[in-house]
Amino acid sequence: MTEPKPGYTAASGSRLIQQEDPSAMAADTTLTCRDCGQQFTFTSGEQDFYAARGFSEPSRCPDCRAARKNERDSGSYGGGSRGPRQMFTATCAGCGGEAQVPFEPTAGKPVYCSACFQQRGGGGRAGFGARGGTRGSY
Ligand SMILES: [Zn+2]
Ligand SMILES: [Zn+2]
């Protein structure tokens, strides 16, 4: 009579081995930064992220990308919103000289250079003709 030994069949429980689907999980890629020449990892997660957005794979390492982003942020700061104002050149009705005005000169309306404008009391307070408008010469 042979006693059947209770063999150790410990493999009866959970299967911990999960099969990785190679088509769903892309492998990490090592890319070379075109700016500093350093190699960096383009992880599978990032690849998904980029693919989902239709981006092409990055050509710069995260460091250089951050640096460029900072540069762009600080560069556009103050430069974009405050562009050079467009000035129009007209003939001053007061002295006949060149007058630069921030608006388009309308025909029939006198345009004054800043000096004449100030002389005529147009300090920008009360506006046109508030003072001394009754000269009658026009
Ligand atoms: Zn780099
Ligand atoms: Zn003038």
Image (cartoon, rainbow, N blue to C red):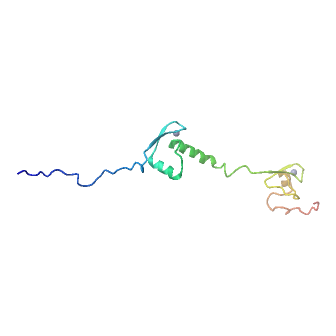
Q: Of 95 and 1, which appears nearest the observer?
A: 1
Which residue of the protein is positioned furthest toward the top in this rendering? 37
With 3 as the anchor, is 70 left or right in this view?
A: right
Which residue of the protein is positioned furthest toward the right in this rendering? 137
Which residue of the protein is positioned furthest toward the front in this rendering? 1
With 129 as the anchor, is 11 left or right in this view?
A: left
With 13 as the anchor, is 58 left or right in this view?
A: right
Q: Quadrant of residue 126?
A: bottom right
Residue at horizontal 81 percent and vertical 61 percent from the top = 127
Residue at horizontal 51 percent and vertical 36 percent from the top = 37
Q: Position of residue 33 (x, y in %)?
A: 52, 39
Q: Position of residue 10 (x, y in %)?
A: 21, 51
Q: Position of residue 26 (x, y in %)?
A: 43, 47
With 12 as the anchor, is 88 left or right in this view?
A: right
Residue at horizontal 85 percent and vertical 57 percent from the top = 106
Quadrant in which the C terminus is drawn: bottom right
Q: Position of residue 105 (x, y in %)?
A: 83, 55
Q: Of 45 and 63, which appears nearest the observer?
A: 45
Q: Of 35 and 6, which appears nearest the observer?
A: 6
**Count of marks, rendered view:** 0
